[in-house]
Image (cartoon, grey):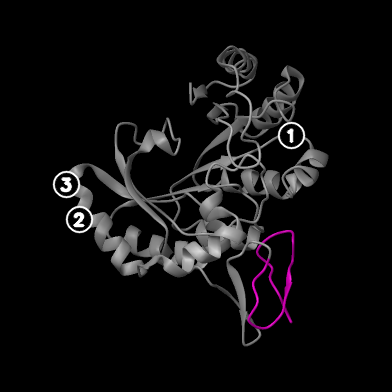
């Protein structure tokens, strides 16, 4: 048995087995990233799709993802690669790309407007070693690194990455500690600490995916934006529309009228608020 220290779960993992994220594995008493270099998604995207509105707007970025996640969101938009029951099968079939190979690919796409690599699609923090190793090479090639994350990792993990990450979009899925634990299987305090620390090292934008019944009240939006403003009132916030997926696959997408109203509410405290998926 060995303990994983990446996130709040502190999984005790038996030899040869994986933690709750489906990616970290005990090999010979050492916890490793079993998804290291296993790429399940690769695309050249506009930077605005991450979403990042105020980091090199108009540019393209090579987006790469693996498998596994340490949250359990019932509305997951990428459940085929994020949830371990699907993810391990996907990962075993996934193409392996070394940090150097992914960096070389990013450099090759410079002529198409690519500025670097975005670590996205699944939760990159659970395979932070691959992010760190690749991002170092991307910097050496004179390019940028972006991470799209749920921010559910220790500050020790963040410290491994901050020398190399230039921008992050961090999901803050609701602003209730109870709902974070009960609905998402997460830890709001860990995410808040991660955001505060990350904001001191790189460009940070936040995303709040509006899920009816979870985080769609004006009161919660005011509490969230008051907290964000306490860090930096200029930190961009994306207020995004949910499209039903995975275990919340019935009903309609979040009403656009509600999204635009919550953008107005958020704008009472923040300078940069963007509607998403509208």
Horizontal side of residue 235 vs 73, given as left or right: left
Instruction: Out of 130 and 272, give the one closest to the viewer.
Output: 130
**Residue neighbourhood size for the residue with mark 3, other residues' Cα within 10 Å, grouped as few (<14), some (14–19), many (≥20):** few
Residue at 67%, 26% in the rendered image: 225
Which residue position holds label 1?
Answer: 175
Horizontal side of residue 36 vs 244, given as left or right: left
**Residue neighbourhood size for the residue with mark 1, other residues' Cα within 10 Å, grouped as few (<14), some (14–19), many (≥20):** many
Q: CA distance from mark 2 to mark 1?
A: 41 Å
Which residue position holds label 2?
Answer: 108
Q: Earlier in the sequence, mark 2 or mark 1?
A: 2
Residue 77 in picture, x, y percent from top left: 54, 41
Residue 81 in picture, x, y percent from top left: 51, 55
Residue 149 in picture, x, y percent from top left: 55, 48
Q: Earlier in the sequence, mark 1 or mark 3?
A: 3
Residue at 62%, 88% in the rendered image: 28
Q: Give the secondary structure at mark 1.
A: loop
| Among the 4 quarters of the image, the one containing residue 94 | bottom left
The answer to whether residue 123 is visible is no
* Residue contact at pointers 1 and 3, CB within 8 angstroms: no
- Give the magenta-colored segment's residue range: 1-19
Q: CA distance from mark 1 to mark 3?
A: 42 Å
Q: Quadrant of the N terminus?
A: bottom right
**Residue 93 lies in magenta, yes or no?**
no
**Residue neighbourhood size for the residue with mark 2, other residues' Cα within 10 Å, grouped as few (<14), some (14–19), many (≥20):** few
Q: Give the secondary structure at mark 2.
A: helix
Q: Give the secondary structure at mark 3.
A: helix
Residue at 42%, 58% in the rendered image: 40
Residue at 48%, 26% in the rendered image: 277
What is the number of callouts on the image?
3
* Residue contact at pointers 2 and 3, CB within 8 angstroms: yes
Which residue position holds label 3?
Answer: 111
């Amino acid at each position: 048995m060995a303990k994983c220290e990446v996130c709040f779960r502190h999984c005790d993992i038996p030899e040869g087995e994986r933690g709750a994220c489906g990616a970290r594995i005990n090999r010979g008493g050492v916890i490793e990233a079993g998804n290291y270099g296993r790429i399940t998604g690769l695309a050249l995207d506009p930077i605005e799709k991450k979403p990042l509105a105020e980091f090199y707007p108009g540019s393209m970025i090579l987006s790469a993802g693996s498998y596994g996640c340490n949250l359990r969101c019932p509305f997951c938009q990428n459940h085929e690669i994020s949830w371990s029951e699907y993810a391990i099968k996907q990962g075993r079939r996934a193409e392996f790309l070394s940090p150097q190979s992914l960096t070389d690919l990013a450099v090759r796409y410079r002529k198409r407007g690519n500025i670097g690599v975005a670590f996205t699609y699944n939760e990159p923090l659970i395979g932070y070693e691959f992010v760190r190793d690749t991002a170092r090479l991307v910097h050496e090639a004179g390019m940028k690194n972006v991470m799209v994350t749920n921010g559910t990792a220790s500050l020790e993990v963040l410290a491994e990455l901050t020398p190399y990450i230039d921008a992050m979009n961090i999901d803050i899925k609701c602003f209730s500690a109870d709902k974070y634990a009960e609905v998402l299987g997460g830890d709001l305090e860990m995410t808040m600490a991660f955001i505060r620390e990350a904001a001191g090292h790189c460009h940070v934008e936040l995303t709040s995916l509006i899920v009816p019944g979870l985080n769609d009240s004006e009161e919660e939006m005011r509490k969230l934006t008051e907290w964000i403003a306490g860090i930096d009132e200029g930190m961009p916030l994306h207020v995004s529309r949910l499209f039903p997926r995975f275990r919340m696959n019935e009903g309609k997408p979040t009403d656009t009228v509600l999204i635009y109203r919550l953008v107005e509410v958020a704008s009472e405290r923040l300078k940069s608020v963007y509607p998403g998926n509208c």
